Image: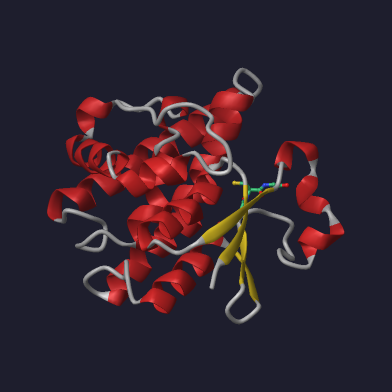
Amino acid sequence: MSIDLYTFATPNGRKISIALEELGLPYNVHPVHIGRDEQFAPDFLRISPNNKIPAIVDSENGRTMMESGAILLYLSDKTGQLAGDDPWVTMEWLMLQMASVGPMLGQANHFLHFNSGKSEYAEARYADEATRLYGVLDRRLGEAAYLAGSYSIADIATWPWIARWPWHRVDWDQLPNLRRWYTEIAKRPAVIAGWDVPVATGDIPIP
Ligand SMILES: N[C@@H](CCC(=O)N[C@@H](CS)C(=O)NCC(=O)O)C(=O)O
C-alpha cells in the first residue's frame, strides 16, 4: 500500500506531507510546479478536478482525492490516528482553517508579500484579518494544548499557514500561546521531514 502525493512546497501541500510523515504511511512524491502551470495538465486534472495541489491517489483502492481538508480527514479515518479528543471539535478547527485561516492568510500572502505596495486598502484589510485570526488561535491555545485537545489533523492543517508568519506582520509578544504551539510543532521530526517535500526551500522560520 502506498499513497501517491501530488504536491508543491506551499502550506496546503505541506499539510499532507506532514500528515503522511506523522502517520508513517509510505508515499511517493510527484512535484507539481504551480509556477510553471503544471497543475493545468490534463493528466493532473483527472486527479484534481479544481487544478490545485495537494491531491493523492491511494494505491490500495485506487481512490483519487483533492482538497487538503478532505485528504486529512481521509488519512485520519483510514489509520484511526490524529483525530483529536472529540471529532466535532477537530472538525470545528479544521473547518476554521479551511474556510478562514487558509483563504485569508492566502490573501495576506498575496497583498502583503508578493504584491506589497499595490493596494493600501487590501494590505490593511488582510493584515487586520491576519492579526484577528492569529488572536483567535492564540485564545484557543490558551485553553487547550492543541486545537482539538490532543495533536490532530486540525493542527497539521493550520501550522503550515502560521509558518508563513514572516509575511504577516505578526506581533509575537501578543501571542504567547500560539508561539508555544508553533515552536513545539516545529520541532516534531515528522514536521521537519514533511516541510522539505517535494523540495527543501529553507529552514522552518522560528519567531
Ligand atoms: N482548498 C484547497 C486549496 C488548494 C490550493 O489553493 N492550492 C494552491 C497551492 S497552495 C494551488 O494549487 N495553486 C495553483 C493555482 O491556483 O493555480 C485545498 O485546501 O486543497
Vertically, is 139 above or below 44?
above
* Residue located farthest toward the right when viewing the structure as drawn: 42
Residue 121 seen anywhere in this rendered image of the structure: no
Total labels: the figure holds: 0
Nearest the eye: 28 or 111? 28
132 over 123 or under it: above or below: below
Q: Is residue 82 visible?
A: yes
Q: Could you say which quadrant of the image residue 93 lies in?
A: bottom left
Where does the image place residue 90, in percent across and percent down from the top left?
32, 68
- The percent coordinates of residue 31 (x first, y second) are 67, 46
Query: In this rendering, would 135 be left or right of 110?
Result: left
In the image, farthest residue toward the top:
117
Q: Position of residue 183 (x, y in %)?
A: 25, 36
Q: Position of residue 179 (x, y in %)?
A: 24, 36
**Residue at 42% across, 58% down:** 19
Tell me where residue 5 sits by quadrant.
Answer: bottom right
Question: As displayed, is residue 110 above or below residue 93?
Answer: above
* Residue occupying the point 31% across, 62% down: 152
Q: Is residue 3 above or below residue 109?
A: below
Quadrant showing the C terminus: top left
What colouring style does the render use?
Answer: secondary structure
Task: Decide if residue 39 is on the left or right side of residue 7.
Answer: right
Picture residue at 29% right of the left edge, 45% below the top: 188
Residue in the picture at 49% in, 52% down:
17
Q: Nearer the viewer, residue 147 or 132?
A: 147
* Left or right for 188, reference 109: left
**Relative depth, front residue between 62 and 165:** 62
Query: Is residue 111 or residue 159 the one in the foreground?
Result: 159
The residue furthest left is 143
